[in-house]
Amino acid sequence: MKELSLKYGCNPNQKPSRVFMEEGELPFEVLNGRPGYINLLDAFNSWQLVKELKAATGMPSAASFKHVSPAGAAVGAPLSDTLKKIYFVDDVKIPLSPIAVAYARARGADRMSSFGDFIALSDTCDEATATLIKREVSDGVIAPDYTPEALQILKEKRNGTYCVIKMDPNYVPAPIERKQVFGVTFEQGRNEIDLTGDNLFDNIPTDNKTLTENAKRDLKIALITLKYTQSNSVCYVKDGQAIGIGAGQQSRIHCTRLAGNKADIWWLRQCPKVLNLPFKEGIRRADRDNTIDVYIGDEYEDVLREGTWQNFFTEKPEPLTIEEKKAWLAQNTEVSLGSDAFFPFGDNIERAHKSGVQYIAQAGGSVRDDNVIETCNKYGITMAFTGIRLFHH
């Protein structure tokens, strides 16, 4: 197939809409449903991300995309019982394969942002992965292949309209890419920068130069994730998965704060007081996720006020106090942080430190590098200058 007509473009008034190849055939096949314009933007960006994560780590990888930026990205590292519980996969009856675990991590890290996502899988989608996907609100999935059992499960989702795309894993795009803006054609070489090697971290200007193997893996995950995140962007990673992504902010400190707040929420969801919230039976998954998010935040009274808490809980929970939050957040350590360009000031490091960051990879090259290095040294943080900028637009 050389061309695929779409219902409309980014918005319903933007017609006609299509995707096509100037030479050769489209490198994907629609197995079910009808993808839209934004669906395919998410699909192709997320596919590149998981393909590169798999190449960099050797592990099955998954991503959850919303509006052309990742809400989550992860590799198939083992899940603790706590993570199974906060990702709501502890009740699954069949064993979770490595690709299913990668998906559970990518989808579960920021469940609010992943609502209605497009999913990418580096490996064949199997029955376990399809079972998890079927339970969530999602627009579609792209993968190199699907088992017959998985395809049948996915075809039943959304009354048979769920979008399932099979991607040719051997497809190599042309080295020059083009796009039009306001009738003007832009052309550039594709961003083929290699982010798989440990030589990324050779230049460490901080006093602490310790980089564990897990830290190297997590920093690679952060940088590859940022390669496909709308800039400015930063990414917090722990134990093989992104736990906070800040995308498309005009100020880097706002990126760092936004992503750091998401990382904090991910960690606070593992607090025993949150894990043991007395939810009513039958509460919808989206309502439960939103309730947890509000309960953790500063506006917790919105779900604890009289006449409201009864909609969600069997009994009224006690608030999670500021002191309890600080004590729990202090236990989060060994977090890695990547930035798609240099940190201009040490305030980014100050904010990162509050979310347990111990390892940083950033481009370097700011006139205030000395201030950034000094701030890292104050907290014993290891920071590598990669010399690589990863802007994505």
Image (spheres, grey):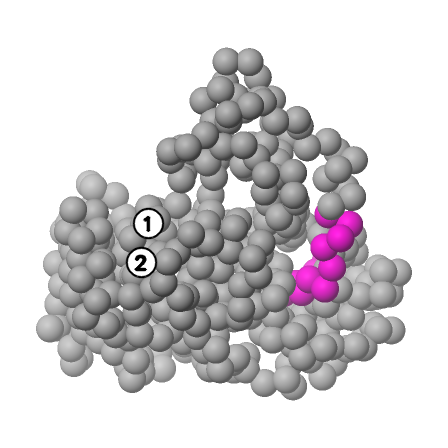
**Vertical placement of residue 252 versus 47, above or below:** above
Task: Return the residue found at the far front.
Answer: 93
Label 2: which residue? 131
User: For residue 217, which quarter of the picture?
Assistant: bottom right
Q: Quadrant of the C terminus?
A: bottom left
Numbered disc 1: secondary structure: helix
Q: Residue at x 22, y 51 (%)?
A: 157
Numbered disc 2: secondary structure: helix
Q: Amino acid at mark 1?
A: Arg
Q: Nearer the viewer, residue 277 or 377?
A: 277
Label 1: which residue? 135
Would residue 254 be counted in the magenta stretch? no
**Vertical placement of residue 174 versus 182, above or below:** below
Does residue 242 appear left or right of residue 144 in this picture? Answer: right
Does residue 282 appear left or right of residue 326 in this picture? Answer: left
**Vertical placement of residue 201 versus 125, above or below:** below
Q: Residue at x 57, y 17 (%)?
A: 305
User: For residue 140, which quarter of the picture?
Assistant: bottom left
Q: Residue at x 12, y 58 (%)?
A: 5
Res 311 seen here = yes
Please tell me how crowded label 1 is: few (under 14), some (14-19), or many (20+) other residues with Cα within 10 Å: few
Task: Return the residue found at the far top.
Answer: 307
**Which contiguous range is marked in magenta?**
329-345
Q: Nearer the viewer, residue 69 or 302?
A: 302
User: For residue 123, which quarter of the picture?
Assistant: bottom left
